[in-house]
Each structure stands twice: as structure tokens, then as C-alpha cells.
Amino acid sequence: MLSVMIILLAIRQSVQAQTGSGSGGISAATTEVKGYFAVGTTLMYAIGAIVGLVGAVKVYNKWNSGEQDTSRVAASWFGSCIFLVVVATVLKGFFGV
């Protein structure tokens, strides 16, 4: 009976030790992700700017060559650029960072 009590006490101590370090690990991970989130948002803005510039050059080339689907290509490139900027802004507001 005494050995069972000692084993149960050891298991309880083990579980309590894991619980304390688990919450500390989650807090550390949350802090780490918040630190990278601002960098990621800035990166999304930069990618959006690059996509916008590449799209503008492609649309300009299509327009000068006289192709008929210039407006469709312009809308798709402009839409993708706006999408990247809006997603970055919405995620920033949603997570409160």
C-alpha cells in the first residue's frame, strides 16, 4: 500500500511539473509569434508592392502591343496586389498586433 502511495505521489508531481512548464512554453511561443508578426506583415506589404510593380509592367507591355485582354490582366494583377495588402491589414487588426 505504501509503494502505491509513493508511485501516485511521484506521478502527481510529474504531472504538476509538466503543467507549469507547458503554460510557460505557450506564453513564450505567443511572445515569439507576436515578435515575428510585425515583420511578416511588413513582408506582405513588400510582396504586394513588388506584385503591383510587376503587374504594372506586364499590363503596360500588353497595352503597348495592342492585345485585347489588357483590362482582364490589369484587373487580375491589381486584385492580387490589393488582396495581399488587405490580408495583411485584416490579420494585423484581427490579432491586435
Image (spheres, rainbow, N blue to C red):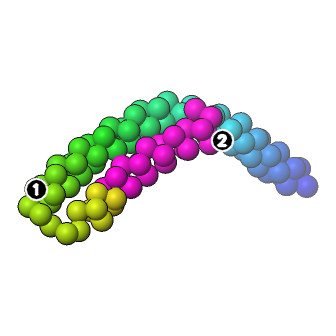
User: 72 left or right of 3?
Assistant: left
Q: Residue at x 55, y 44 (%)?
A: 90
Is residue 66 rendered magenta in the image?
Answer: no
Q: Check disc 2: other Cα within 10 Å, few if <14, some if 14-19, many if 20+.
A: few
Which residue position is annotated with label 1? 64
Closer-to-camera residue (74/10):
74
Estimate the x, y position of residue 65 in percent, counting from the top left: 8, 61
The residues colored magenta run 77-97
Residue 10 appears in which quarter of the rendering? top right
Task: State if disc 2 and disc 1 touch (CB < 8 Å).
Answer: no
Q: Is residue 58 visible?
A: no
Q: Is residue 93 magenta?
A: yes
Q: Is residue 61 left or right of residue 15?
A: left
Tag 1: residue type?
A: Asn
Q: Rounded to the nearest whole Å, what is the CA distance between mark 1 and mark 2? A: 61 Å
Viewer-closest of 36 and 64: 64
Q: Is residue 43 visible?
A: yes
**Which residue of the protein is positioned furthest toward the left in this rendering?**
65
Q: Residue at point 91% right, 55% down?
A: 1
Q: Residue at x 34, y 52 (%)?
A: 78
Circle nearer the viewer, 1 or 2: 1
User: Residue 16: which quarter of the image?
Assistant: top right
Where is residue 69 drawn, in percent x and y? Answer: 23, 68
Identify which amino acid the numbered label 2 is placed on.
Gly
Label 1 CA crowd tier, 10 Å (few <14, some 14–19, many 20+): few
Residue 39 screen position, x and y as percent: 41, 33
Q: Which mark is residue 22?
A: 2
In the image, farthest residue toward the right: 1
